Each structure stands twice: as C-alpha cells, then as structure tokens.
Image (cartoon, grey):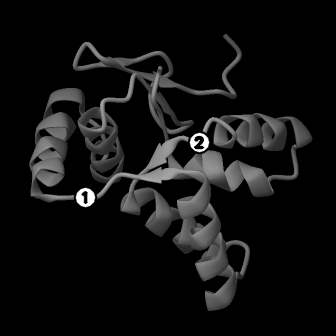
Amino acid sequence: MNKVFIDSNIVLYLMDEDEQKRTIAAQILALRPLISPQVLTETANVCKRRFKYTKEQILNLWADLTNDCFLVPTDVTIFSDAIKLSKQYNFQVFDALIVASALKAGCKTLYSEDMQHKMLVEKSLTIINPFAQS
C-alpha cells in the first residue's frame, strides 16, 4: 500500500471557493492520509486568521482530522532530519518538518502545493501537487 502524507494546504482546500480544488482535496482526505502536528498547527493558524474560526471550530476541525487521518508524532529525530533536509534540499523550515515526518512514516507520496511538483526526496518520497497541470 502506498502510504500518503498531506500538507496543510490540502486540508485548507476543503474550504476553497473552487469546487474542483475542494473535490480533489476531499478525494485525497478519503485516502485516510497521514498528517503531523505541524499540519494541524498550520491549518489552525490559517483557519483562525483567514476564516475567523473560533477556538471551538478549530478544536472540532482537529478532532475531525485526527479521526479521518493518521497522526504521526513529532520527536527529536524529526527535527534533526528536518534540519538536514532543509539544508540539503533548500526546503523552508516548516516544509522540512512535514517532509521529515512523511519520510519517518514511510510514505511514498506527499501531497503539497507548496513544494516542487514531482520532486523525489531521499529516493523514496515523491512530492505531488494535486492541482498542477501535468
């Protein structure tokens, strides 16, 4: 089975005005992907700022996400791996944390709009922008 990991932007497209992007995001979430605390935090931050979510709405969203996805815990090795990945691949710091989590979980695919489409990381993880025109 190809385990997939998602970035926060995939979750946020569930709330997008573009119906096609909402549909694609929902299809990816239906795969029961893996997520990290970083994804939950980034999603909450955007929902609070952009969508004016209340604390209760954010907590409900977190409950839904942790029910519909598999949560990969963050530990010290993920941070040290993220440092290495950030330097080696020139990832932004927060993106490096997500990539490190996906790698640690043994995922083959990371869905993200924020990173290079079809990039292969560590010969095992492919970053896919599901909204890219291939």
Image location (x, y in percent) of residue 71:
42, 55
Figure quadrant of residue 37: bottom left
Q: Which residue is mark 2?
A: 32
- In the visual, does 13 lie left or right of 2? right
Q: Position of residue 117 (x, y in %)?
A: 50, 21
Q: Which mark is residue 127?
A: none
Which mark, by number, is residue 74?
1
| Percent coordinates x, y for residue 90 in the rendering | 24, 34
Does 13 appear above or below 33? below
Label 1 amino acid? Thr
The residues bearing labels 2 and 1 have C-alpha atoms spaced at a distance of 19 Å
At x 10%, y 50%, the residue is: 77
Say whether residue 66 is left or right of residue 14.
Answer: left
Q: Residue at x 35, y 52 (%)?
A: 72
Q: Circle 2: is it few (<14), some (14-19), or many (20+) Cα within 10 Å?
A: some
Is residue 94 in view? yes
Apparent side of residue 124 relative to residue 22 in the rendered image (left or right): left
Mark 2 or mark 1: whose residue is earlier in sequence: 2
